[in-house]
Image (cartoon, rainbow, N blue to C red):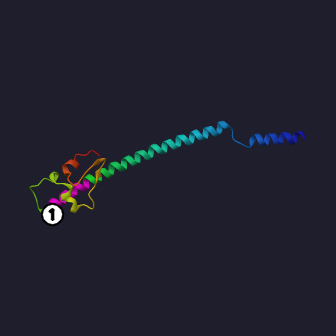
Amino acid sequence: MLTALQNHRRRSADAGFTLIELLIVIVILGVLAAIVVFSVKGITQKGDTAACQTSVSTIDTAAEAYLANKDDTTTAAGTLTLQQISAFMHTIPTTVGSTPVTASTTVSTIDGITC
């Protein structure tokens, strides 16, 4: 009878995890979660920068296409507004990077935006 009680106690003591083991696992999961959050933040910043650079490049290309279509060699591309070159763009952007732009914004203003 005594050995059966000792076996029962031994099995119940070995059946679970200790509080320290559970806390260590929780800390490790927290560290891994923090690493993932900071990695994703860097990815989104790179994406925003690439989108801004693409917008500036698209506007520059539209200005060059406008001047080539008009066969105008006297007008500087930087003096054109988004309204003038809108026919050469799919849509007129409302922001470039974090800077708001309108149809009257000039190409040179957009070229000066730091992405």
Category of crowding for the residue at label 1, using alpha-carbon neighbours closer than 10 angstroms: few (below 14), some (14–19), many (at least 20) = few
Which residue of the protein is positioned furthest toward the right in this rendering? 1
In the image, residue 44 lies in the stretch drawn in magenta: no
Viewer-proximal residue among 92 and 88: 92
Query: Whole-percent x and y of residue 72?
Result: 10, 59
Residue at the spot x=24%, y=60% of the render? 89
User: How would you classify the magenta stretch by its main secondary structure?
Assistant: helix
Query: Whole-percent x and y of residue 61?
Result: 22, 57
Q: Which residues are magenta?
A: 57-68
- Element under label 1? helix
For residue 99, side relative to residue 23 (left or right): left
Badge 1 is on which residue? 69
Which residue of the protein is positioned furthest toward the left in this rendering? 74
Task: Identify residue type, mark 1.
Answer: Asn
Hey, which quadrant is residue 29 in on the image? top right
**Above or below — where is 96 with respect to 70?**
above
Residue at the spot x=52%, y=43% of the render? 32
Q: Quadrant of the N terminus?
A: top right
Query: Whole-percent x and y of residue 48?
Result: 35, 49
Viewer-proximal residue among 86 and 48: 86
